[in-house]
Amino acid sequence: MIGGILIVIILLMAVLFVALSYNSLVKSDETVNEKWANVETAYQRRADLIPNLVAVVEGATDYEGEVLRDLTEARASVGKAQTPAQLQAAGEQMDSALSRLLVVVENYPNLKATEAFLSLQDQLEGTENRIKTERDLFNKAIKDYNVNVRSFPNNFMAGMFGFSVKEGFVAAEGADVVPIVDFDD
């Protein structure tokens, strides 16, 4: 009788352990998914600002079509990104196209003083800050998730239920190289 009760208690503890481990992994995974959605939303906000910025620049300049095409392609690639690496590459493509647009703007001092352009520029700057914040929160969620997946004894449950280590955002290649600023040119 006591042996049977002991076996039932051990089985209940095992089931409870599996359930708690599984639920912990699911919670961590859902947190990562939530943070990823926030990153995508921040990138989408930037992509949504681009047509307005382009319209303001087009209206006030002898606009260069190649820059518009590059911005449109970059905007589309942001929407197609499925992983942090793809979104980071799309973001870098967008950064490059935006930089070229801002070079065009430099040739039009009156444009830089317009309220619409200044407002969009401020919104874009704020959005860039949001993107960085959301990426940082996503990376923290990834770290917490990976610790959960790799820690004993959850690592057994993770393997059994198909939870694997995930990758977050990493610095772009060359980000560790300090740019050289030369005012003599």
Image (spheres, grey):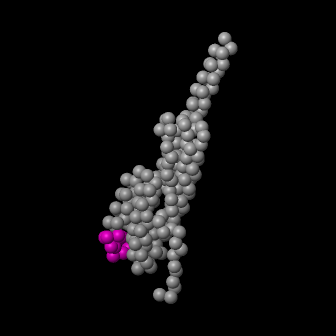
Q: Is residue 97 left or right of residue 178?
A: left
Placement of 96 over or under 5, stated as above or below = below
The answer to which quarter of the image holds residue 31 is: top right
Instruction: Spot the residue most to the top.
Output: 1
Placement of 54 over or under 48, stated as above or below = below
Instruction: Spot the residue most to the right.
Output: 2
Viewer can see residue 26: no
Looking at the rendering, the stretch of residues picked out in magenta corresponds to 58-67
Viewer can see residue 68: yes
Instruction: Decide which of 3, 140 is in the foreground and name it.
Output: 3
The x, y position of residue 70, in whole percent, is 34, 66
Instruction: Decide which of 83, 113 is in the foreground and name it.
Output: 83
Q: Residue at x 55, y 53 (%)?
A: 139
**102 drawn magenta:** no
Instruction: Decide which of 24, 64 is in the foreground and name it.
Output: 24
The x, y position of residue 77, in whole percent, is 37, 57
Placement of 108 over or under 32, stated as above or below = below
Instruction: Spot the residue most to the front.
Output: 3
Q: Main secondary structure of the magenta part?
A: helix
Q: Is residue 76 left or right of residue 26?
A: left
The answer to which quarter of the image holds residue 2 is: top right
The x, y position of residue 54, in whole percent, is 38, 66
Instruction: Spot the residue most to the bottom.
Output: 184
